[in-house]
Structure formats: C-alpha cells, structure tokens
Image (cartoon, rainbow, N blue to C red):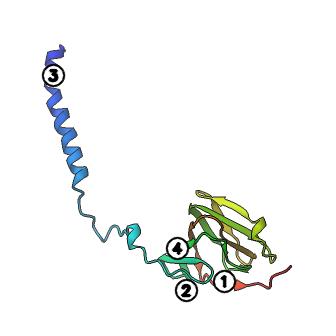
Amino acid sequence: MKMAHKLWLLPLALAGTLSISSAAETPTPLNPAALMSKLPDQIPWSKVDARGAQSAVVVGDPAKPGFYMVYNKWTKGNHFSRPHFHPNDRYIVVLQGTWWVGTGPKFDPEHSTPMPAGTFVTHFGKQVHWDGAKDEDAVLLIMGEGPGTSTPVKEED
C-alpha cells in the first residue's frame, strides 16, 4: 500500500483519541449495587483522643465478631499507646509517615522500631506490643477479625 492510501486512517485515529479523552472527562455514573466509595474528606474520623490517636472505621465493627478495617492515625508529638494486646491477629499497612513500634511489657519509645510508609506488619493475637508516632503523623490501615478489644498489660521497668 502506498502512503497516500493510508492517510485516510489518520482522521479515524484522531476521532478515536478524542472520544477516549471525552470519556475520561465525563465519567459514567457508577452503579451503587456494584461499588461504594468514600473520598478522603468523607471518611468519618473520630476526634483525637488523650493518647494522640484518632480512628475511622471503614468496614465492619471492631467491637463485634467479624472482619473489620480501621484507619488509625497517631498524631506527631511522641504519642504512644501503652503495652497491651489484642485477642486476634491484626494486619496493618503503614499508609503515611513513620509508625514506631515496640514489643513486650517494657514501655520504651526511645528504643522503638520505625516502620516507614509501605510497611506491612502482623500483630499476633495475645502478644504484647505498643506503638505510636514521634515527629510526624502516622496513618495506618488495620484489618482483623473482631472483637478487636485491647487489654492493657502491667508495665515493667
């Protein structure tokens, strides 16, 4: 085929490109039976508590049996939980910032271990740990089977 005979394909390619970009500008409405979403400003965060943490339940109810997912934010300023454990395994993804963790009944944030954004952590059920944030906020996604209660542990020196 000669080049002149192929030139008729150019308008078709351009039309296809324009229709694709137009589709991107006007999204098709989503079927709520197929998908549910919440933009970041629609996530129902709690107020910051006395420990310097806030949370937002996004799936399930951590107080009840069954699967749950919770966003947890430790605010900057050396805010930490005290030694505690949960009855079931919990799976955590660090979404933002650096999360600082420690294990055992000795509370020692100075010697905690940093977990940067992107880290995946498993808190094993009935194992003592503590955690928090130092100089920047740390945002986590915590997943597990409820009830996700927290049992405090007597601290050791």
Q: Badge 3 is on which residue?
A: 7
- The first of marks 3 and 2 along the sequence is 3
For the residue carrying disc 2, how many other residues have a C-alpha within 10 Å: few (<14), some (14-19), or many (20+)? few
**Observer-nearest of 137 and 11:** 137
Q: Dots 3 and 1: beta carbons under 8 Å?
A: no
Vertical comparison of 78 with 113: above or below? below
Rendering coords of residue 142 (x, y %): 57, 71
Q: Which residue is mark 4?
A: 69
Q: Secondary structure at mark 1?
A: loop
Q: Are marks 3 and 2 in contact (CB under 8 Å)?
A: no
Residue 126 position in % (x across, y down): 73, 78
At x 58% / y 56%, what residue is drawn? Answer: 118
Q: Label 3 amino acid?
A: Leu
What residue type is disc 1 on? Ser
> Measured along the vertical axis of the image, is residue 1 above or below residue 152?
above
Position of the N terminus, as image quadrant, is top left
From the image, tell me which residue sits under label 1: 150
Q: Is residue 16 above or below residue 99?
A: above
* Labels 3 & 4 near each other (Cβ < 8 A): no
Nearer-the-camera pick, 27 or 111:
111
Q: Is residue 16 left or right of residue 93?
A: left
